[in-house]
Image: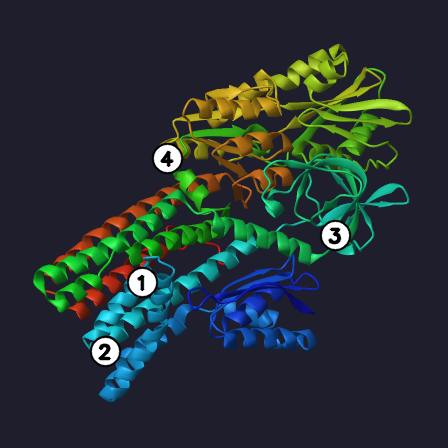
Amino acid sequence: MRFSIVHELKPLRNISPGRIRMRGTGPLGLDGAAAIQEALASFPGITQIKVNPRLGSVLFFYGDEHARALVLAFFARLENDARILPTAEDLAALRKSSPVNAFMPLLSYLFVRPLLPPWLRAGLAVYGALPYLWQGLRALMRRKLTVEVLDAAGIAASLAMKDFSTISMLTLLLGFGETLETWTRRKSLASLAESLALNVANVWVLIDGKEHLVPLAQVHEGDLVVVLAGNAIPVDGVVHEGQGMVNQSSMTGESGGVARTVGSSVYAGTVLETGRLVISARHVGDETRLTQVLSFIEESESLKAGIQGKFERMADLAVPFTFLLSGLVLLITRNFVRAASVLLVDYTCALKLSTPLAVLCAMHEAAGLGVVIKGGRFLEALHEVDTLVLDKTGTLTQAIPKVVEVIPAPGFARDEVLRTMACLEEHFPHPVARAVVRRAEEENLHHEEEHAHVQYVVAHGVASELNGQKLCVGSRHFVEQDEGVDLSPLVEAIGYHTALGRSLLFMGQNKRLAGLVAIEDPVRPEAADVIQKMRELGFRRIVMLTGDDDRTARALAAKVGIGEFMAEALPQDKAQVVQELTAKGAKVLMVGDGISDAPALSAAHVGVSMCDGTDLAREVANVQLSRPTLEGLVQARILSQRTIRRIHRNFVTTMVANTAFLLGGLLMILGPGTSALLHNLTTLAVSLNAMRPHFPGKQDDA
């Protein structure tokens, strides 16, 4: 692959580093991007590396012309020999590595350093301090009083006192903290990448005017892929036929749907909200799916928790006060050692390091527990929510409903009713549609593609035409009120099955009732227990929403212990309920799995999707349950509460301990070296505490 410079800013008189953006002739893929990232990180003088695998773009900052020349030479060699990059196996081994190497400098400090002559120990101490001095000087030249400036000032004070032992200890602890943070971030993001991977196994391909279901792996460039409302787009390509609204939030950050018509470009991993598209494939395969994973990871890392941002701002604000206190001590006591002792103790390191580590490690732990949280602010929001709203079908009930009876209307054959309903429903991802198709397959009722285009009406049903007959399949509201079908021929059967709490799916043909299917939604065995636990965890109000009629909804709500519900709810009704609750001051956690739940999921403070829900629901949700159980809700709530409590405990520990060290320095009880050691040990202690698992032994190591 050939790379070229598309933008460059030269270093400005050593005040700011140089910056180069390069772009390749094609996409890099996730492994290629990670390999380039690792390779550039190994070059001296190269910082802030950002690689976009989808665009083939590489952005990096360099300190001097020598570093610039090294990188450009690297890309020149890469054009002719890709073997200079680490292989996928090398990167996999690197990701699985542990922070053992971080302990090597500690072992050297304890066992090798005492054996060295004094002049060599001093030289090594100064050499190790130079990078930190440079970082502090660079921040100061940008007129910023940051933690780096404070670290550099502490090291400079120790240099002025010729306290090389303190310098060695400071650089050792600072380096250990950075290594620990880097390793934790890499390990956590690798886990998130695995959890957020987009799975698309089979797709509909248009061949000779008919739709055929084929494995995604068999789709090639130029194939016509059919995507219906509610499904993820599995390929990068151009719209060949149709129109629709595409949710591109995972790719572009746009929150609303974007209109796509013939000639428009679409991307893998985005979701078709409404309409029908026939897409001419351009890029297919794992690369596009891995690009989606990377986009999710970049988004999740950028969505910082509010508490994290608050503590980081507090940390930066504390730096000038530390300098001021040290200056006052020097002015009053005229004792440089006392002033240095104050300078070597600050509140910033522990606050800036432990809080993001706590958030990221909690997200990593959640992924191992089957809960994918798409950003730190959603972890914090999980702690704040006080109202739980749940969809019924596929959420409180299992996502594999069963057809218990097929009842034809007078003048229609049972098998033909089931066959026709399956023919229409097989295009749609709702659990009820799957149940109908599954029952037809069990009875060996084949349903060839002979109908015209299927129109899907969200939360209502489907309509099509077969052999000149106008067909509609869907809810009672859709078939009776919207399509004008008289349901009186089966009124007794409707009453009987409704009293049992079963869902009913009706079929109309040319405005006549053809039959109905009674579907039983088995209640999730853990549902009642989860509802009770969520109440105990602080949820003051729990509401169930469903499109079923009042009797069916009431029967299910009684089984799981929910006293408040809304029946016959349309998508806009569900979203309106969430908005009304929010307007009254409630902080809503919404759980759903279907296309009709998407507006409510978006309107809630935290939207949670089930693992077997539709692609659209998983796309708009802030949290995904990657296991087919509601227990993840309980674990997510407990994890968020414990994480926030731990962050606050770390804050108190940091403030109390460092205040004590400051007083010790002021009263000459602690010297500069001891103050620095205790301060950095406190930072490491709260960071290690932030990384401790909240559910020891419960994570899935797979």
Residue type pointed to by label 3: Leu
Give the residue drawn at x 86%, y 32%: 451
Q: Farthest residue toward the top?
A: 488
Mark 2 vs mark 4, foreground winner is 2
Give the residue drawn at x 68%, y 57%: 286
Marks 2 and 4, how far apart at CA = 53 Å
Q: Which mark is residue 216?
A: 3
x, y percent for residue 153? 26, 66
Mark 2 vs mark 1, foreground winner is 1
Mark 3 vs mark 4, foreground winner is 3
Please tell me how crowded label 3 is: few (under 14), some (14-19), or many (20+) other residues with Cα within 10 Å: some
Q: In this view, does 573 lie above or below 373?
A: above
Residue type pointed to by label 4: Leu
Marks 1 and 3, how far apart at CA = 53 Å
Task: Residue under label 2, please give it.
Answer: 164
Marks 2 and 3, how far apart at CA = 62 Å
Please tell me how crowded label 2 is: few (under 14), some (14-19), or many (20+) other residues with Cα within 10 Å: many
Marks 1 and 4, how far apart at CA = 43 Å
Disc 4 is placed on an element classified as loop
Residues at marks 1 and 4 touching, judged by CB atoms closer than 8 Å = no
Disc 2 is placed on an element classified as helix
Task: Residue under label 4, please give it.
Answer: 537
